[in-house]
Amino acid sequence: MVIDIREVDAFLLGIKPAVYYCVEDPQFQHSRDQLMTYPFVNKNINLYDGTDFFLFFQNEDLKQKFLGQSKGVKVRSNKFHRILGETLGYPPKAVDFYVQCLDKKELEQLKVGMHYMGIHCSGSVVDLVENALWLWDTYSRSDVHSLLEVRIDSSFYSVNCKDIERLKELQDLALSTKAVHVE
């Protein structure tokens, strides 16, 4: 059976290493009592003003690692975004791309979304195959079968685990819709 796992469920099942929520997020509100039993940080992590954020971790070691990496790092800086993306368990190439987009907005036209096992992130269409393989290798479980959903612009496309041919088709489709040519 194929299931769609919400981010909070992936965390509560022990799949996702950390989750990051603003207090107004419905998933946070719905699961607040369960989430509050996990180690968390809620100071100096707000990505925007006007609301509070929480970063929950599977264990105290992950929390301490984050605190060590982020000590002295300015919130909202590129370095903070890199640390946060790595902490949340996103593919390394997706994290790299996101941080590059912070300085080079023109790169955003290469963005494709990826949703798998409660992991929701974006990356470059150029790295789609590598990012998908990383997600499959990192988060696949024998007791849960989930499709990879790839978002190109506003459309979603399903990909079975390790279906490289389908990924390459979607990569070609995405590149054909983008205004930039990739070398």
Image (spheres, rainbow, N blue to C red):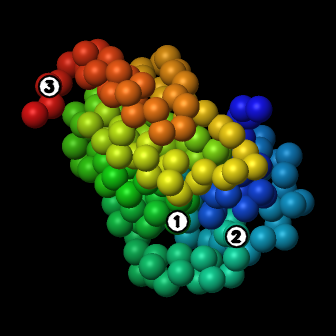
Instruction: State which quarter of the image contains the C terminus.
Output: top left
Q: Quadrant of the N terminus?
A: top right
Using the numbered discs, state the Cα–Cα distance from disc 3 to disc 1 in whole angstroms: 32 Å
* Image coords of residue 77 (percent x, y): 37, 62
Could you tell me the amino acid type at mark 3? His
Residue that label 3 marks: 181
Give the image location of residue 71, x and y in percent.
Answer: 46, 82
Instruction: Say whether marks 3 and 2 touch (CB < 8 Å).
Output: no
What residue is shown at x 22% (from left), y 43% (from top)? 104
Q: Secondary structure at mark 2?
A: loop
Q: Which disc number belongs to residue 58?
A: 2
The label shown at residue 87 is 1
Camera sees residue 54: no
Q: Residue at x 38, y 57 (%)?
A: 92
> Foreground: 75 or 70?
70
Residue type at tag 2: Gln
Kindly indicate the quadrant of the structure image that contains residue 17: bottom right
- Residue closest to the far left: 183
Q: Which of the two residues, 135 or 109, is positioned nearer the viewer here?
A: 135
